[in-house]
């Protein structure tokens, strides 16, 4: 599996193994496994802890980059920016939750391909 393939599957919220099955059935409800290839998504307790790191890191990165741009580039007052950043820090992680989990699944697939994945099969035949 290539990096761009992992990233595109993650952004489409598709199974990291086959790219066909959906990961989420509703906004916060995941399927237990892929309906196409059978890959199990939630592999152990605490498996998705890494997705929280992804979500936090991206949220913090946007605030750290956006704050000086809005203050020094556009002249917004710091009071306004603090409230905007506060609102962003509440809303963005909730919206990005699914993508963070999907990215985490993709990163896991990239570094530790599951046995039932097509990529693992391709690797074995090479
Ligand atoms: Zn699948």
Image: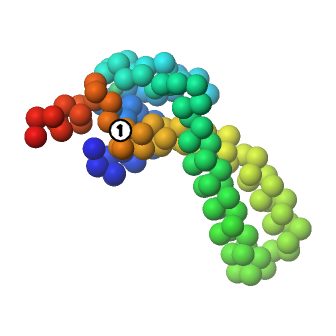
Position of residue 9 measured from the top left corner of the image (x, y, whole percent) = 38, 40
One can see residue 35 in this view: yes
Where in the figure is residue 117, as x and y percent of width and height? 28, 29
Expressed as whole percent of the image width and height from the top left, the position of residue 42 reads: 50, 25
Query: In the image, 63: left or right of 34?
Result: right
Q: Quadrant of the C terminus?
A: top left
- Residue at (61% x, 28% y) in the render: 28
Find numbered disc 1 in the image and state the secondary structure of the residue it sits on: loop
Q: Quadrant of ligand 1?
A: top left
Closer to the camera, 22 or 41? 41
The picture quadrant where one finds residue 37 is top left
Q: Is residue 122 left or right of residue 39?
A: left
Residue appearing at x 79%, y 59% in the figure: 84
Q: How is the image coloured?
A: rainbow
CB at disc 1 and ligand 1 closer than 8 Å: no
Residue placed furthest toward the left: 126
| 26 or 109, nearer to the observer | 109
Within the image, what quadrant is residue 81 found in? bottom right
Q: Residues within 10 Å of mark 1 (few under 14, many from 20)?
A: few
Picture quarter with the N terminus? top left
Question: Image point 66% across, 54% down: which residue?
Answer: 59
Looking at the picture, does residue 39 appear above or below residue 47?
above
* Residue 98 visible, this orientation: no
In the displayed orientation, state which residue is furthest to the right: 79
x%, y% of residue 14? 40, 33
| Residue identified by numbered label 1 | 112
Figure label count = 1
Is residue 104 found left or right of 86 in the rendered image? left
């Amino acid at each position: 599996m290539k990096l761009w393939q992992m990233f595109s599957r993650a952004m489409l919220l598709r199974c990291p193994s086959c790219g066909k099955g959906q990961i989420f059935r509703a906004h916060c409800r995941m399927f237990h496994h892929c309906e196409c290839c059978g890959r199990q998504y939630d592999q152990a307790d605490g498996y998705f802890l890494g997705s929280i790191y992804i979500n936090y890191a991206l949220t913090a990165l946007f605030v750290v980059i956006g704050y000086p741009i809005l203050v020094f580039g556009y002249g917004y007052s710091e009071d306004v920016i603090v409230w905007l950043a506060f609102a962003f820090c509440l809303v963005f992680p909730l919206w990005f939750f699914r993508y963070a989990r999907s990215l985490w699944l993709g990163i896991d697939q990239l570094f530790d391909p599951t046995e039932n994945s097509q990529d693992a099969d391709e690797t074995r035949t090479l």
